[in-house]
Amino acid sequence: MFVFAEFIRGLALLISLVFNVLYFLLVIRIIISWVGVDPYNDIARIIYLATDPVLAPLRRLPLRMGMIDFSPVVAFILLSVIRNFIVNILYQIVHRLGG
């Protein structure tokens, strides 16, 4: 059971890392939108491809106030809630396994 508990703990850390990378990419995307980088730049396209699945559903909601789009703020909140939920469940499993 110890090995399985350590596997679950590692999975929780990996999921947390993936969410942290996604947070970082969202911050970079916000900065790119302020600076006005060419959207056809290879790095900008990679960032758009990585963050569009998160932002696209939120952009359909009325989250704009004038020129300000609040969908990244809502994305940060939702991602944080989802990450905490998943990681806490995994740590509860580890705790019950005695790891």
Image (cartoon, helix red, strand yellow):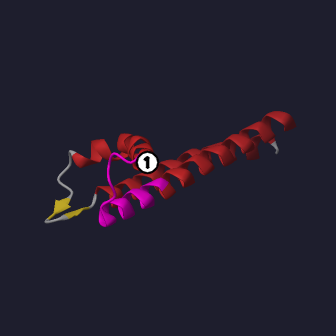
Query: Would you say 50 lies left or right of 67 here?
Result: right
Q: What secondary structure characterizes most of the magenta part?
A: helix
Q: Amino acid at mark 1?
A: Ile
Q: Quadrant of the C terminus?
A: top right
Q: Residue at x 17, y 53 (%)?
A: 62
x, y percent for residue 89: 61, 44
Query: Would you say 44 lies left or right of 95 here?
Result: left
Q: Which residues are magenta?
A: 25-41
Q: Quadrant of the N terminus?
A: top right
Which residue, given by chain and number where applicable, does mark 1 sit on?
47
x, y percent for residue 71: 29, 55
Q: Residues within 10 Å of mark 1 (few under 14, many from 20)?
A: some
The local secondary structure at tag 1 comes to helix
Q: Residue at x 56, y 54 (%)?
A: 20
Q: In terms of depth relative to the viewer, which is nearer, 50 or 73?
A: 50
x, y percent for residue 35: 33, 66
Query: Would you say 83 lies left or right of 46 here?
Result: right
Residue 35, can we see it? yes
Q: In terms of depth relative to the viewer, which is nearer, 36 or 91?
A: 36
The magenta stretch spans residue 53: no
